[in-house]
Image: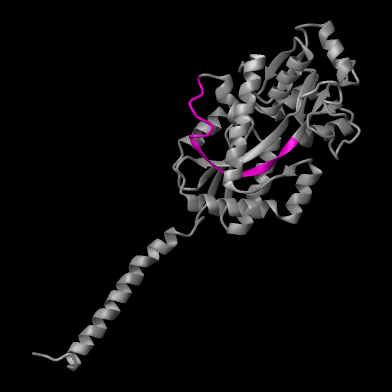
Amino acid sequence: MYGEDDPLIGLATRLGTALALLAALSAGAPAADAQKYPSHALRLIVPVPPGGGVDILSRAIGQKVAESTGVPVVVDNKPGASAVIGTELLQKSPPDGYTLMMAYSAHVTNPLLNKNVRYDPIADFTPVVHVGYIPLILVVHPSVPANSVQELIALIKAKPGQMQFASGGAGAGAHLSGELFKYLAGLDLLHIPYKGNAPALADVLGGQVPIMFDTITTALPHVKEGKLKALGVTGAARSALAPELPTMIEAGLPGFEVSAWYVVLLPAHTPPDLVGALNGEINKALGDAELRARFAAQGVEIVGGTPQRVDGFLRTETERWRKVVQATGMQAE
């Protein structure tokens, strides 16, 4: 028998160890590559047409994340049915961290307004981060003979059922604001929904619809050019971008507070490590000085934070609007 100190035994042992190490390294290489996230392009679903606040924020954040990760972030506009088409697309996507969506207020109100919506705003998605929010402003076409909120209320009451307000679709901030306006002021005002804020605003600019609550980001430039008249803001406080405008509360409607908010979601059951990685990248983008300055100039209040924070926010918003929907009887047209 050969002893343990036999040269052949030693050679065989060393060779076996080397082969085992090589096999382990070879087996471990694909696993290491699989753990690299993101390793290829991210798809960012934007459930509205190009040009509105949701789209503008999505593209700005997508650009920063792409610069940081070195992989493209492809913005995919999927408008329709007040964001339901894009949302259901996310719901059915694989939970691999590569398909995400910029959601807004319609995400939690769609199931409250439409019994045919086939998703649960909480259970069917994984929250990533609360990007921020923007106050809305009440604007009217220059032909409307009203220069204050109270004058507009008097005008609408003088023409019950004859005046309309536009929105980017049922459940969007513009729709919720209009319905709250009707409810608190006791108005008979017709809702005209569009497939996104951009086409809705275009018709208000053209005079086809006289009234709209729009994000301050997109409406204020038209106000400064004299193409629209601004009467009030929907936030709890006046906006630094238009400090001369009273809040709707100051204008005589206690309890009127609405904002257009934005959150990033992934499909349900996305692994926590991928959620954490994406949360970190988006928070890094939100901390970028150039992006923060650009958002501030557009009236965007940045939030950021953990997935748990946005999960709590979505649950609170769902309950808040459930009560409003029940009180007003509003529904999707």
Residue under the point 62% across and 40% down: 263
93 with respect to 56 (left or right): left
Magenta-colored stretch includes residue 117: yes
Residue under the point 64% across and 14% down: 329
Q: Which residues are the magenta region? A: 116-134
34 with respect to 307 (left or right): left
Residue under the point 57% across and 22% down: 112
Evaluate whether residue 330 shows in this view.
no
Q: Nearer the viewer, residue 70 or 147?
A: 147
Displayed quadrant of residue 47: top right
Q: From the image, which quarter does the N terminus lie in?
A: bottom left
Magenta-colored stretch includes residue 232: no
Give the answer, above or below, for where 329 lies relative to 74. above
Residue 272 point in image, percent of width and height: 48, 50
Residue under the point 81% across and 21% down: 253
Residue 62 point in image, percent of width and height: 63, 48
Displayed quadrant of residue 130: top right
Q: From the image, which quarter does the C terminus lie in?
A: top right
Residue 217 point in image, percent of width and height: 77, 37
